[in-house]
Image: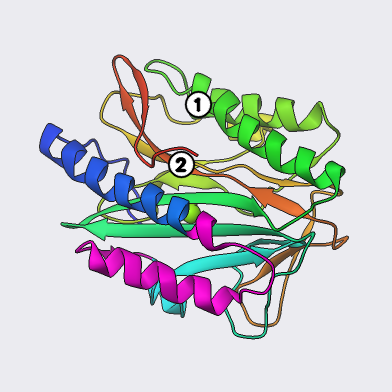
Amino acid sequence: MAERITIKSESQHELMRAAGALTGETLAYLGTLVRPGISTKVLDEAAEEFIRSHGAIPSFLNYEGFPASICASVNEQIVHGIPNKKTILKDGDIISIDCGAKIDGFHGDAARTFLVGEVDPDIVKLVEVTKECFFKGLEQAKVGNHIADISRAIEAHANAYGYGVVRELVGHGIGSDMHEAPEVPNYFNIRMGRGAKLVSGMAIAIEPMINLGVRHVDFLPDGWTCVTRDRRPSAHYENTIFITENGPEILTNPI
Ligand code: MG
Ligand code: MG
């Protein structure tokens, strides 16, 4: 991970638009495939095929050893679920799909939580509010504000519903590295301070991870999958955004 915050040039901004657009399109396409009976492995294969057929590289594949092109996290899995043949979606599940595409050296990174068939209304609400949390954070992503303004807005919206806000994993800067400085937490505490000041040319991924129950997490023995400690459901929603003088620009085609 790059330690410094990188400021992108106009030509790099264009490359990030291309990578972001394809990332968003990939997720929209995967959303059309989500249904009871499909395995997360099939979704992963579809994602890799889609990304490569558009002349890009799946950002996640082999990233720090991750074995797939998407993270597929079902129900109590928060993030970093590994696609596999045995995980077959069933009616009432939710699945968070996180995906990235690299074009000409620059990355897009985005995530959506999809409903599978008929989902419990409490869980539907969690998915909706998690998406709203992103947009609450986005409103604060303007030149002159600080990272903590985004963090606070996300946390306040989730807290209003009594949800748990995950702390162990956070949003991040993004560019020629998928994970760059600064960190973009979904919560605030006084020790963190205000965080980096937002300036034109920064690109960040804002990605609330919100739990129906407690905020605490466990990591499964596979070394990747992050689950809620109480095993109640969790939702994830992410876009890559670009800070401009005219406000934030979402690069990953929000759906
Ligand atoms: Mg992501
Ligand atoms: Mg991310």
Per the image, label 2 sits on a secondary structure element best described as strand
The foreground one among 87 and 119 is: 119
Check the image and report above or below for 228 versus 16: below
Q: Report if residue 58 is visible in the image.
A: no
Q: Which colour scheme is used?
A: rainbow
Q: In this view, does 176 lie to the left or right of 147?
A: left
Mark 2, other Cα within 10 Å: few <14 / some 14–19 / many ≥20: many
Any magenta on residue 75? no
Question: Residue sitting at 51 percent across and 71 percent down?
Answer: 43
Check the image and report above or below for 76 versus 131: below
Label of residue 239 in the image: 2
Amino acid at the residue labelled 1: Leu
Any magenta on residue 41? yes
Q: In this view, does 107 lie to the left or right of 164?
A: left
Do callouts 1 and 2 mark residues in contact (Cβ within 8 Å)?
yes
Q: Look at the image and give the residue range highlighted in magenta.
A: 30-59
Q: In this view, does 204 lie to the left or right of 37?
A: left
Check the image and report above or below for 231 versus 134: below
